[in-house]
Amino acid sequence: MKKAYIISTITALIFIVAGFIVKATLFPDKEDKVVKVGFIYDGDRITPYTDNFINAQESIEEKYGKKVETVAKYNVEENAAEADIQELVDEGCDVIITASYGYGTEAKKFAAEYPDIEFCQATCSNANEEPVYKNYHNFMGTIYQGRYITGVVAGMKIKEMIDDGIITEEQAQIGYVGAYPYPEVISGYTAFFMGVRSVVPEAVMTVKYTNTWNNYTLEKKVANQLIDMGCVVISQHSDTNGPAVACENAHGDLPVYHVGYNKSMTEIAPTTSLVSSNLNYEPYFDAVVEAMLEDKRIEDVVDADTYGQDSAAGFDKNWVRVLDLNEAIVAKGTKKAVKDNIKKLINGDIDVFKGDYTATNPNDKTDTISLKNGYKENEKSSAPTFGYVLDDVITVID
């Protein structure tokens, strides 16, 4: 009897242990779960655009500790990311975040092939296009809000120069270094211009494209060309600090100031860089990891406006930020103006794309619109859609 009891006890223990092993294998404890996140970047830490993403990557590493593992691929050419994405798949990533528009087509193809991996594509607009995959997502902050606020900062500086007799109203010229003639870029510089014009209605702007996202030498060269044309403020939608350096080193007859993007540029341009704005990807990355740990759909976790497989938010959710207002050189009252205008944007009291303007589609001169009734940006997607150039007041140089 004693021997039989021992055998039965041992048998029971074996079944209990086996049960725990099976449960641990098939249903791992959430406390022990590790989420592996892969990143595809078109630059590296030197590039402000990529540096901004890396900061968000590091934020989830710090917050989640051993619960998250990350791996990143740097300087991956757009439209040529297939091999790098495949490497992240083969390395066992649960989530792959691709950080530039040009990766969208390839990332979506991989989402179709690997339905158990989540693919999150920044600044793209194809998540809700057929075919729609539940594991393929788009995300972006409503950056036009940040552009508008930095335009207000630039406008106040220009007005100060006019009031002080440094320039005339006719010399209120802005230069803008744009990467490509895409709606993302056009929407951004239009919002910036509207911010300037809310303070200086006489201001005009000249835009020159580099046709590349990331070329320090070319961006600096284009900025210098705009400075030579008499522009007193230079802003940018390009990925390096070349335009800021051009402004800091300018020695023309007129002063010139800079408004940056992606990161603060006051360290490299302390006497000319007024302010910068950027997108804050930390809230989205945080939601992605939390969703994976909790086995939930990303759009059910993220605190943002969602459109199917797409997520967006602005100042209200800290997805858009104004960086390092350079109080040593901005006009008096600028800090308060920034605070007041952000509040108005959050409350819906400012219609950025509204005014007595007409605008033309640069790809179809017969396609024109009026902004008298306004244009609602980011109405159905996180990616900007405004792709019209304001007539008479914005000049584009090819």
Image (cartoon, rainbow, N blue to C red):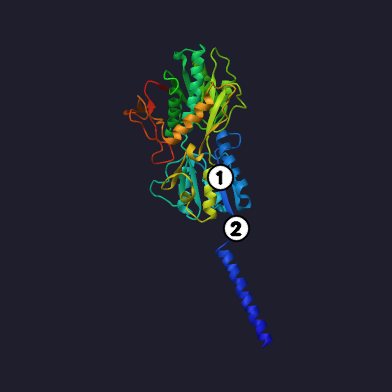
Residue 226 at what x, y percent from top left?
Answer: 50, 20
Question: Which amino acid does the dot numbered 1 rest on?
Answer: Phe
| First in sequence: mark 1 vs mark 2 | 2
At a point 46% along the width and 37% down the height, the residue shown is: 142
The percent coordinates of residue 61 (x first, y second) are: 61, 47
Q: Tell me: residue 49, above or below residue 152.
A: below
Q: Provide residue 288's location: percent of width, then percent of height.
A: 52, 49
Which residue position holds label 2?
31
Residue 234 - label: none
Quadrant for residue 345, please give it. Answer: top left
Q: Name the element at disc 2.
A: helix
Residue 83 in view (yes/no): no
List x then y, in percent, for residue 379: 39, 39
397 relative to 245 in the view: left or right: left
Instruction: Answer left or right for 148 relative to 59.
Output: left
Furthest-right residue in view? Answer: 2
Q: Residues within 10 Å of mark 1 (few under 14, many from 20)?
A: many
* Three-letter residue code for mark 2: Glu
Q: Which residue is mark 1?
A: 39
Q: Residues within 10 Å of mark 2 (few under 14, many from 20)?
A: few
Q: What number of labels is visible? A: 2
